Image (tube, rainbow, N blue to C red):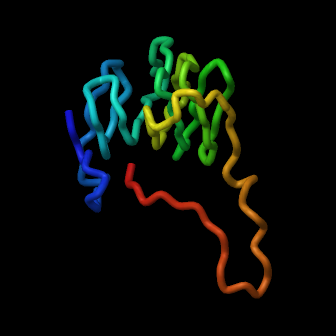
Amino acid sequence: MDLNSDFSQRVVVHTDQLDWQPSPIKGVDRRMLDRIGDEVARATTIVRYAPGSRFSAHTHTGGEEFIVLDGVFQDEYGDFPAGTYVRNPPTTSHTPGSDEGCTIFVKLWQFDLEDRTQFHKSMADELPAPSTGSPLRPCIGIVASM
């Protein structure tokens, strides 16, 4: 599948107008934003986990990174609430899921294949404190309807 795969072209995607598509795992749905390939693909996707849903254990040969938009994402590395950035480089494995349900913004297969730096961070901890009187405040934003 090729979806918005010509990165030289600007594309605007209204995620609230996209239907949720089922993944191979029951209770996990997605809105595909770009994709080059079939089920294992270079992709950018919004993924929604229903409460109690889980993927089977798998390895990310090309790496993955994601931001938890709402709820709590879980795997054997921890519980990651909304506002957490998680970076799983090539060759990392995990068993993802969510007890309460969650939505993530995820990018797959976009790493240098030699990269092995794995970490997670609360994005709020990385923002400088706003200064008083300053007309500009730092922000991180993703415009996406869930």
Image quadrant where one finds the N terminus: top left
Residue at 58% in and 20% down = 92
**Horizontal and vertical percent for residue 22?**
28, 28
Q: How many marks?
A: 0
Hey, which quadrant is residue 109 in on the image? top left
**Horizontal and vertical percent for residue 91?**
55, 19
Hey, which quadrant is residue 129 in on the image? bottom right
Q: Is 98 displayed left or right of 18 in the figure?
A: right
Q: Is 98 displayed left or right of 40 in the figure?
A: right
Residue at 39% in and 48% down = 146
Nearer-the-camera pick, 108 or 130: 108
Q: Residue furthest top?
A: 57
Residue at 48% in and 40% down = 104
As drawn, 27 above or below 6: above
**Horizontal and vertical percent for residue 30?**
33, 36
Hey, which quadrant is residue 35 in on the image? top left
**Horizontal and vertical percent for residue 50?**
43, 29
As drawn, 94 above or below 142: above
Nearer-the-camera pick, 122 or 112: 112
As drawn, 56 above or below 144: above
As drawn, 140 above or below 130: above
Residue at 46% in and 43% down = 105
